[in-house]
Image: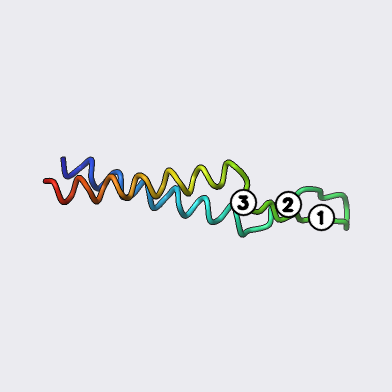
Amino acid sequence: MKILTYLLVIVGIALIGFGLYNAFVPQEVVDIGPLEVDAKEGLSNQTLAMLGLGVVALIAGAMLRKRG
């Protein structure tokens, strides 16, 4: 049960980190010669889903830790 708890916490932190990275780091869209265009995607549905799943995984890990 401890392995599942640690795994949920690690996955939750990774999902939250990746979601925040996607939300705040501009992604390169077009690179043509000296012209480079960056775009900030912001909070898309995929980013919000990653953040939500990360929070759910952290809560589940915390609940399993208290139970065991």
33 or 48, nearer to the observer: 48
| SS at circle 3 | loop
Q: Residue 43 shows which numbered tag? A: 3
- Going by the image, does 67 lie left or right of 42? left
Asked if marks 3 and 1 touch (Cβ < 8 Å), the reply is: no
The residue where tag 1 is placed is 37
The residue type indicated by label 3 comes to Leu
Mark 3 → mark 1, Cα distance in angstroms: 19 Å
Asked if marks 2 and 1 touch (Cβ < 8 Å), the reply is: yes
49 or 31, nearer to the observer: 49
Measured as percent of width and height from the top left, residue 27 is found at 69, 52
- Going by the image, does 40 lie left or right of 9? right
- Going by the image, does 26 lie left or right of 65? right
Picture quadrant of residue 2: top left
Mark 3 → mark 2, Cα distance in angstroms: 16 Å
Measured as percent of width and height from the top left, residue 41 is found at 69, 51
Q: Earlier in the sequence, mark 3 or mark 2?
A: 2
The residue where tag 2 is placed is 28
Measured as percent of width and height from the top left, residue 43 is found at 62, 51
The residue type indicated by label 1 comes to Val
The residue type indicated by label 2 comes to Glu
Is label 3 or label 2 in front?
A: 3
- Going by the image, does 26 lie left or right of 20? right
